Image: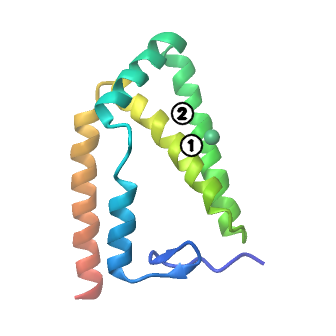
Amino acid sequence: MAAEVKPCLYVYGDYINSNAVAKVVKEDNVNKIPFEDRKKVYMNALITYGDRHQMIKCLEEMSECTKEICKILNGGENFDHLAEEIADATVTLEQMRLMFNINDRVCEYMDAKVQRLNDDLKKQFH
Ligand SMILES: [Mg+2]
């Protein structure tokens, strides 16, 4: 039987309060290698391996991420594997943002979509 899917405040096996969520999110956003330095590595990878190879790699990593989410939906509890695949997918997606020179547009879309989600949530509960 599939595991119950917990709503958003379920992290690492326990429901946590909103202060704890804020702390987790803040920690998630602190990479030791800043974006400007990651960009240099990504450009090197794109030059070394080529655009097509890195696009295929991105598809592979998104697929592995999908697989880990499916495992959790089917009752798995390996959140470390999920974290690793989210990291892999993010690294390759960041390369796509550079490759197609759409980083600014992605940021704009993200802001708009988070704002829309927030607006939708306000309609749900108010
Ligand atoms: Mg992977």
Q: Is mark 2 within 8 Å of ligand 1?
A: no
- Side (left or right) of 30 relative to 16: left
Q: Residues within 10 Å of mark 1 (few under 14, many from 20)?
A: many
Where's residue 59, x and y in %? Answer: 57, 35
The extreme bottom residue here reads 126
User: What's under tag 1, amino acid-wise?
Assistant: Met
Which quadrant would the N terminus be assigned to in this image?
Answer: bottom right
Left or right, 68 with respect to 55, comes to right
Circle 2 sits on which residue? 58
Question: Tag 1's secondary structure?
Answer: helix
Q: Are marks 2 and 1 in contact (CB under 8 Å)?
A: yes
Residue 16 % position (x, y): 44, 81
- Front-lying residue, 108 or 37: 37
Q: Is residue 15 above or below residue 114?
A: below
Picture quadrant of residue 71 = bottom right
Q: Tell me which image quadrant ligand 1 sits in.
A: top right
Q: For label 2, count other residues whose C-alpha is less than 10 Å away and answer few (under 14), some (14-19) or many (20+).
A: many
Q: Residue at 26% of width from left, 47% of height from top?
A: 109
Query: Residue 48: where, in percent of width, then height?
Result: 51, 11
Q: Residue at x 28, y 50 (%)?
A: 110
Could you tell me how far apart the alpha carbons at marks 2 and 1 are, in whole angstroms? Answer: 6 Å
Q: What residue do we see at 58% from left, 48% from top?
A: 84
| Three-letter code for the amino acid on which mark 2 is drawn | Cys
Q: Is mark 1 within 8 Å of ligand 1?
A: no
Element assignment for label 2: helix
Q: Which residue is mark 1?
A: 62
Expressed as whole percent of the image width and height from the top left, the position of residue 70 reads 67, 60
Q: Any mark on residue 87, and which?
A: none
